[in-house]
Image (cartoon, grey):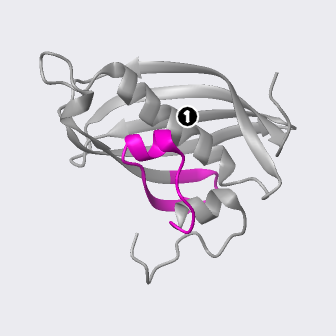
Amino acid sequence: MSPDADVTHGRPGKFWAAMRGETPQPPAARTLGLEFVDADPEAGVIELAFTATTDFTNPMGNVLGAFLAAMLYDTLGPALLATLSPDEFQSTLDMNVNFLHPTRPGRLLGRGHVTHRDGDIARLEATLTTPEGTVIATATATARVIPLGVEAV
């Protein structure tokens, strides 16, 4: 993100501070090369980018599905986090991944969406694409909204 552009709209909280680069990202997000692109919290949508390195590949040179799943996981959660207040967090209850197309190392784009929320339970979906628009994997998940500092069960 350009230091001159604040697509986080100055929103408060640890999540947004990390998205703006004001605080360090979690280690897993750094490993995946997570980069914040854009968000529309009112619509429950977030766009992220990831950098798949050659360290993520199988013997055929394709990015392992486990890394693609981790990128989708790190897209689903932030889609919901972007809609929450600074004193709330989310806990993923389940996740289903579909691998659609093999991919090589490079930049990958994640788009997450909160499709439904009823109280503290949310349904989420995400897609992972190449910069050219080829969908390589999709995921759906269910998450629970929890107050910060409360352990998920």
The percent coordinates of residue 50 (x first, y second) are 35, 46
Residue at the image point whose x is 51% and y is 39% from the top: 74
Q: Mark 1 points at which residue?
A: 125
Quadrant for the C terminus, please. top right
Image position of 5 (left or right of 51): right
Residue found at x 62% / y 34%: 124
Of all residues shown, which one is farthest toward the left? 60
In the displayed orientation, state which residue is furthest to the top: 59
- Against 9, residue 143 (above or below) is above
What's drawn in magenta, residue-wise? Answer: 21-46
Mark 1: which secondary structure?
Answer: strand
Is any part of residue 35 visible from this angle? yes
From the viewer's perspective, is 57 left or right of 11?
Answer: left
Q: Find out whether residue 52 is within the magenta segment.
A: no
* Quarter of the N terminus within the rendering: bottom left
Q: Position of residue 90 (x, y in %)?
A: 73, 39
Q: In this view, does 70 lie above or below 132?
A: above
> Residue at the spot x=57%, y=43% of the render?
113
Residue type of the residue flagged with mark 1:
Glu
Residue 41 visible at all: no
Instruction: Report if residue 23 lies within the magenta region.
Output: yes
